[in-house]
Image (cartoon, rainbow, N blue to C red):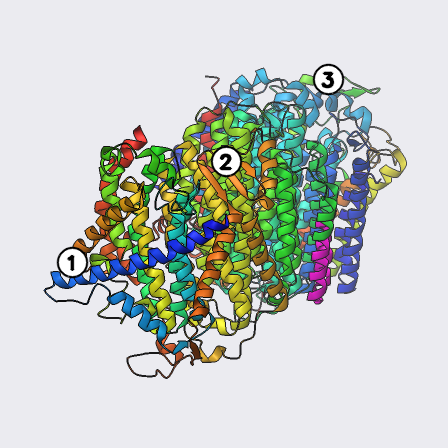
Amino acid sequence: MVNPVVIIAITLMAAFSIGIFQFFGKKFVRGVFWLTILFDFSAVLSIAYGFLTGKITKPIMVKIGGFPPPIGINLSVDRFGAYLAVVIFFIGAMAAYHWLNKGIDDPEPKALVLMLLLLLGSTGMIFTQDFFNLFVFIEITSIASYGLVASNVDWSSLEASFKYIVIGSISSTFVLLGAVLLYKFGGSLNMLDISSKITPSRYGGVLMIIAIMFLFGLLIELELFPMNGWALDIYQGANPAVVAILAGGIVKGFYLVFVRSAIYLKFPYILKIGLIFGLTTYLVSQFFAWKQKDIRRLFGYSSVGQLGLLVLAAGFYVGGGLQGIDKTYMLLAIVFFVLNHSFSKSTLFFITDLIEEKDIEKWKGVLKGNKLLKTLFSTSVLSMAGAPPFIGFWAKLFFVLAIPKQYFYVVVLVLLGAVAEIIYYFNLYRITSSDSENCFEIKGSIVPASMNTLVLLGLSFLSGYYFFLYTRISVSTNLLIMMGAAIIIYIFGFSRIFQWVLSLGILSYALYLFKNININLQGFFLLFILVGGLILVFATYPVSKKYSWSFYPLLIFSVLSMVGIALAKEWISLFIFWELMSWSSYLIINQGSKAKKASWVYLVMSAIGGYAMLSGIKLLTSGPNLVPGFNSTAMRYSTLSAILIFTAFLIKMATAPVHIWAREAYGESPDGFTPILSGILSKMGVFGAILTVVYLLPHTAHSSVILYGLALFGALTALFMALFAAFQENVKKVLAYSSVSQVGYILIGIALASSLGYSAALYHTVNHLIFKGLLFVAVAGIIYRTGTSYLPEMGGLIRRMPVTFLAFLMGIITLAGIPPLSGFAGKWLLYSALLEKKWMFILLIAMFASIVAFMYCYKLLHTIFLGQLRDKYIKVKEVPLPIAIVELVLAGLTMAVGIKPSLILDFSDKVVKSLGFYGPGYAYQGAHRIVSKFGYWNAYFMAVFAIGAFIIALVLFFLVKAKIRKVGQLDIGYSGEVPDSPESVHFGYDLYAHMRRAVSPFISPIMENSYKKVYNGIAAFVDYARRFYTGDLNTYAMWVIITLSFIFYIFYKGVF
Amino acid sequence: MWYKILYGLLVVVGGLAYGLLLGGISRKITARLHGRRGPTVFQNYIDLIKLIRKKTAISHGTMFFLAPMFRLLGGIGVLLLVPIVTKSAILSNFSFGGDLIVVLYFMVFGCLGMALGAADSGHPHSALAPTRGLAQMAGYELPFLISVIGLAIAHNTVSLGTLVSAQQGGILHWNLFQYPFLSIAGFIAMLGMYMAYPFSVVMAPQEIAVGPPTEYSSTFLSFMFTGRSLFGVGKYVLFMDLFLGGATNLLEAFVKTFAIFLFVVFITGVFPRYRTEQAVKFFWTYPVVIGLIDFIRIFIK
Amino acid sequence: MVIILEYFMIFLIVLMIALALFAIKTKDLLSAVIASGFISLVASIVYLYLQAPDVAMTEAAIGAGITTLIFVVAVRKTKGREK
Amino acid sequence: MIFFGASLLLILIGLYGALVKRNLIKIIIGLSIMDTGINMLIISLGFVKGGTAPIISLKSLFQKNSLLVDVSKIVDPLPQALVLTAIVIGVAVTAMALSVVIRMYSVKKSIEIDDFKELKW
Amino acid sequence: MRKIVAIVFLAIIGFYIISIFSAFQFGDKYKGVSEHYVKEGIIENRGANLVTSIVVNYRGFDTLGEVTVLFLAATGLSFLLFSCKCEREFKRIKSSLVLRTATDTLFPMILLFGAYIFIHGHLTPGGGFQGGSVIASGVMLLFLSFRSFHPNHKTLSTIEVLAGISFAGIGLLGLVYAKSFLANSVLPLGQWNRLISAGVIPLIYIAVGLKVGAELSGLISDMISTTKED
């Protein structure tokens, strides 16, 4: 451990001595610079390490000049100061490295001096415990940053610097005034000494004004809302290396100083400041960033927003009346927020400098070429947006958990802001990851960004560890290890087949691990996910070559996170894995070449759902029970919380009002992933919905209304999505709507909340996996062979792909629910359940929906396989072997289940019983005869009957044996002519034009348009509203003054 | 059990004969209504024999080949699943406890098969027809489902047998009189189901030769013909069971189905044809509103 | 004597404020700079009255001297008049 | 008391200059007036009525390691020390600001705010 | 409009700040650490000038920071003004004979005076900053009379660097000898009111004076010298 003052002295001496070294040449200067940075960094690291390991427990006090604290100045290095200093020096070093590699303009030694003194100033600022000394260090920091900010080649940096100088001067004026008045008030400048003289009761008098002035000076530096125009201009105009260190390090120093001062001053309204300014800043900047065209300013808005959030968190931490574990949570949240923002944002600024392009639109396709750059950028963006398992996620989670329950609106608003953040960050990601002809070269060194990201990853790991440590949530270690194995898969990205085998291996191992699991709800879904995942992942190999290295790791990650959902024992761990699933699936969907917009919509909807769930969970927490288990009975808000939690599941199931993401996301997602998305992932919504209905709704006052509403949603979903499906021309989009429609039936089953209903829902869940997996897998194979997913371009493929056709036909028959295959039993159970409850209208809609579904069923079969085969597909082969195997396996399954429904119903019975229902509402007679009180269903008989009838027909046919003559494809009775091309006689486009005319009012995308309208409305509004930042220095200064008057007005209850 | 299969065969043969006859009568009546002489009532038998006796049959592919089987299977299935004479060991056929829902779905089986075969022929017209049929089905199924679900809820069963026995004990117990609005909706839907005249755009004899079976000939066509006849009879029986109290003996069954048949034929003779979307719109308005009157009554009860 | 000194102080203060207003109001940057230099000078006299000789010296040397000089240089380099 | 008022007025006038003036150098002049005001305020805060400067160089005041004069007759030395620092910092900031202005002038040949509104929204 | 808004809000702020003055009477007694400084200052430091004692010793860390600020400003200024790769250019304009003659005689005296001020910083008013700025004003005089004058930047930097390093070095020596940075126990304290007294205070003030003088001179010369671009 090094005496902290030595750090300052050595740095100063080095900075001074550069004046001589510059005569010897640049190398000497650089040498001195790096040696100093190295020394400083290792020194603060040793202190921080001491704190971390517990070797140092109390803050290190350094008396300067040998005088005891109130007399002389003293430094006090506490835990957070030390940590922050490490961060600042690290990022400072990275920024310097970046800048040196980029090439500084002529007086490089001077720039390095400024850099050193900037780091020194901020370190001193953190370490000092004297109000005036603080002012001096603030000035050192500010002046160094004035100079550095102005240093960009772009002249607009001068403008930014000037604005900063003026506002910074005003800010430090208030700090100085406050410090001196504090001296006058308390008789010393030492923070602790003054703190000991302040009692909250003294805030009636002038102390309030003094404290406000001092803290206000710091608040300006914290870039809070009405007075942060200058900061945004700096982010936009200044050298990104400088901005990286400002945003990543220095501002955090100001933040720590602010919080510490507020604590020392015992300022009573710190929470109000957080709520008024912090929250406003957060929300306003997250929305203002939406239409931002300049990438650096966009990141600037984000930085400002994060600072607002930090101030809010500080408000809660200091003045929120938190105690015990809550306080620890909030502290951890703050620490994680700071670390996250420091490392991610500085990386992002480095990357903006590497690309040297300011306009966001010109970032199109930036990430296409460079894998490393893509990883760095994605990691940072994901962490900034709060995606698990990165540190930003844990920060947000801790934050939400720690907020007292009476501030629920804060939770809602913060999560709203988080959604807004995701919207613009992933708009950016959408642009950067899309295809483009643009060619980019990386100008500069990528090392700093990589180092930052490495640290970020390490911190993410640590923070996740801390989360589970503090919340005492148990997660399956096996699961985490297997998730870790996804990284190994990533490393083996060069060999697709290896990745594939490894993925299958992991899934099989998981299945082996959980082979003895109890068949309750969780166990049922666990097996469902793993078995389904195994089958569907098996089929991905042929199509996976189209997608990036990260396809398999993400695939395994998402499947395993679903396992995590199924294994979750508390709502909060369910939420964690839920988010993991959403994000990893987003990243996979985004790999589809046209899926950029679609995946964005998917992500935004998922985020809305996820955060709604989080706020619902927040409502369930009570007192010390921060992480409610499923049986939690904190019932005060439970209707609202149930609805909020339901939102997440409904969005994932894509039911009626929130279905808008489904068509495009299903349609454009990678072909290998769509079966999983439809077959398994959307079923996690089913899982969650069952959990909610079983565990939460019974406690609510309005459960019957909610349930009927859900059933209605489900029925309308089933009907309208089936209708929409008929009018799609893209095969995957047809199946997408079909998927959603089928999930609607499942939702009805859940909403029935009866044993028969659950049986129907669970049966249909599995059944849907079978047939929709089959259909999507077959389609993937077809697209793989033909290269198109556009229905009118297909046709006649039965001649080329008979196996696929057979499987597909089975799938369609099951889908349509026609006996004797497995689809019918589910329908029968569902209708019986509905009859039992006498929900006639739901029954009517559901049955009608299944009739409407025939339209798209026929359309699929006809346009893909039947009709005329195009010339260009004459040489098309049967689908690749893995896909064919999966098709046949699934087709076999649907037949087997059709004859013997007990294959599924045996499992679902156990689940229904474990959910607390005494029986499934039906009885078996044999493995295939199901009896309910409305009648019975004999699958075996039906199969025999169908086969028997078929045999009769066949026998009859051969009785009247006629000579069958096979004719050519074009040899049709076409008005006496033989058409010359298949295209001219293939009827494949807009099959239901007549139906469209009949139902046109119903199939206009009303919901989609209204979502679009809302989004565009908000976007237009914020686009206009961000003109608040006029760019006019006077106005910026004016807002500072206005804010100060406002603060005085609201906080000062007068000595007059 | 095995004797049932035997009787099943008998029912199929009988049903076929009856169905062909009804078809012939229908053609005759329609012709008379139009002021033509029309073919003999046995014309359909002649046609069938003629078709069967043709030597060669043209095939376009596997599905084309299998479609008539499906069609026939659908016809046989429907006919055998609805109880012609309730409580009769033989003529209640293979009806069972949950047969109502099964029949509803099985009715589609044959249509789908035929549609697939038609599509496999590669003829655009034969592909067009099923789309019309499916669209129209979406139309008439709504009122039909209203009446079926209404009855099922009202009688608390999904078994045709139970439905029939609930209507015993006098003509006023028939659903036709118990739930007149449901019945009206159901019968209007039935017109659509038969693709009879106002709703005949699917077969559309003038424009598209003979609708879905455009490319079919000889043996294949004979199968479709057979299937269609069986199907028709099955549906008459279904409606009889649903609304007219079923039948306790074969004669009653004949009378009632013939009555329904006549109703269809006379309506057919009078009305001009709707376009598809007109038909759909029609089905979704008047019969639905009418049906909902009783439906809501049951719902409230 | 003391009273005279106090009146003198009041005069100085009024002078300072007048100079400050002039410095803000005038269109000529050079005059404004000189005025603000004078404010410092006057302030240093005030500091003497307030028993702060160290500060007075500093204010005179740095505030009135160096600051004014660099202001003048800056004004000359920007050839400025306020619009 | 009058010194308080005067310093406050100087601060406010300086701030007014920074808020209203459209000329960059004028804004800096405003800031430097504000600095002067602050310094004066601090000094006046440390003043003691009838006190002497905190320089004890007369033999009558200090003998044999003990202070002979009453503490309350010496003005507070700490604010003076602080102001010393503040003045120097003030000139440093002014110098920085002016150098930025000179550079800005060399780019646009203007020192009016209206020409420097490139960064906005 | 802008003016009215500014006046209104400034008035509000002024209104609230005035309320402070009701708590602090003008010319009131003080308490707290200053009492200690006044009572014990001479005993602990042997410096007659209490302000100097505070600036250099009690709050010597502030002064170190302050020197750094000035250093930063000088560095930043030259960094900004000469960041383009242009040659410096010095215009040669003759000034009046009177001024030149006066400068010839005055300049050494000014230097001497400045040196006096910072050497006697612990005894009389003034100290490193004042002395340094006096020296700088001498340099300013040189500029005024000899327009072609430009100081040797290497010399200036060397002085500056050595002064700066010695300041921080003295502080570190304190750390070595008295386990406390900037502790005034490296040298004997000596007798009150003597030139050689007060321990390291005069040394530090000399270093500060030289550094400030060099920095301000450099700063002025940087401001005045122009680039060819202009």
Disc 2 residue type (three-letter): Leu
Disc 2 vs disc 1: which is toward the camera?
1
Look at the image and tell me whether residue B118 can be seen: yes
The residue identified by callout 2 is A756
Disc 3 residue type (three-letter): Val
- In the depicted view, which residue is nearer to us: A78 or A985? A985
The structure residue drawn at horizontal position 39% and vertical position 69%, both measured from the top left corner, is B119
Q: Determine if the magenta segment contains residue A483.
A: yes
Cα distance between the residues tagged 2 and 3? 99 Å
Point out the stretch of residues depicted in magenta.
Answer: A482-506
SS at mark 2? helix
Relative side of B109 to A566, left or right: left
Q: Position of residue C25 (x, y in %)?
A: 40, 43
The residue identified by callout 3 is D69
Cα distance between the residues tagged 3 and 1? 130 Å
SS at mark 1? helix
Q: Position of residue A167 (x, y in %)?
A: 52, 43
